[in-house]
Image (spheres, rainbow, N blue to C red):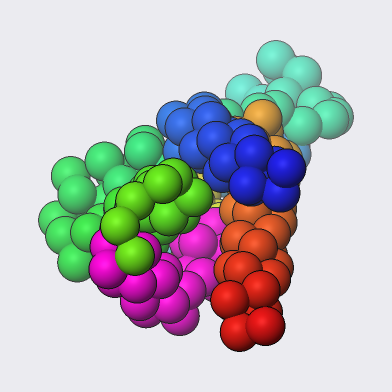
Amino acid sequence: MKVYLSISLVLISLILLIPGVTEPMLTMTGTIEKSQLVNTGKDMLTQDLTEDSRANTRGILDVAASLFGLDTLQGEVEVFRNSRSIIDIITALYQSHNFVVAILVGLFSIVIPTIKLITMLILLLPVAPSIKQRLRTMISVIGKWSMADVFVVAIIVAYMAGNASAGMGDTLKTQSQFEIGFYYFLGYCIFSIASQMMIDMTQTQKSQIITN
């Protein structure tokens, strides 16, 4: 009975992993105060002028802004919205020539979890004892990287936040929101840990039976 439960947990983990890496994980939005946006526009238009020309041009822009009511604007305007999945992040890192980071993110978030789950699934099937011993060794080695997928999520959050605020200083207000992909990936992590624990319990019980 525990074997079937373990197989079910592994299969659920695999099913959750797929949308966990393909669905949007995080959405970053950036907003700017409308009044701040107007002032930033004025600064950009006068930044390459001489001091005297800058003062004259700034005065003209202030008058124009007053005529069109731009000096009384209130509220915020959304300047960007960016939603990305783990696959999107890997692609973006690769396209920006961050090859090592792209490979590591793909390795720890897709390749290693997939290999681990498939190995665990094969271990639960009726295979030769010699093969099972090799599979246990492989799972033990892979288990040392069991927290790597959590760090991948942290890298993704930091990467998106850094790109969102790059070059904008305090002008841009950024907000982040977890999307469905994050919860799928979280579900994968939980079921993966549960399946590993269940397999360990099953293997321990079998060892005790053989010893007795």
SS majority, magenta: helix
Task: Judge from the rendering whether residue 183 lies leftward or rightward of residue 49; answer left or right.
Answer: right
Seen from this angle, which residue lies furthest bottom? 211
Q: Position of residue 130 (x, y in %)?
A: 27, 68
- Residue 30, quarter of the rendered image: top right
Q: Nearer the viewer, residue 150 or 51?
A: 150
| Residue 120 as seen in the image, left or right of residue 61 | left
Is 97 on the left-hand or right-hand side of 159? left
Q: Position of residue 111 (x, y in %)?
A: 31, 52
Expressed as whole percent of the image width and height from the top left, the position of residue 47 reads: 39, 53
Label total for image: 0
Q: Nearer the viewer, residue 124 or 187?
A: 124
Q: Which residues are magenta?
A: 130-153
Question: Can residue 9 be seen in this snapshot?
Answer: no
Residue nearest the viewer, comparing 50 with 126: 126
- Image location (x, y in percent) of residue 206: 62, 69
User: Residue extending furthest front?
Assistant: 212
| Magenta stretch holds residue 136 | yes
Q: Residue at x 65, y 63 (%)?
A: 202
For the point 37% across and 36% down, the residue is 88
Magenta segment includes 42: no
Q: From where the camera sits, is residue 99 visible?
A: yes
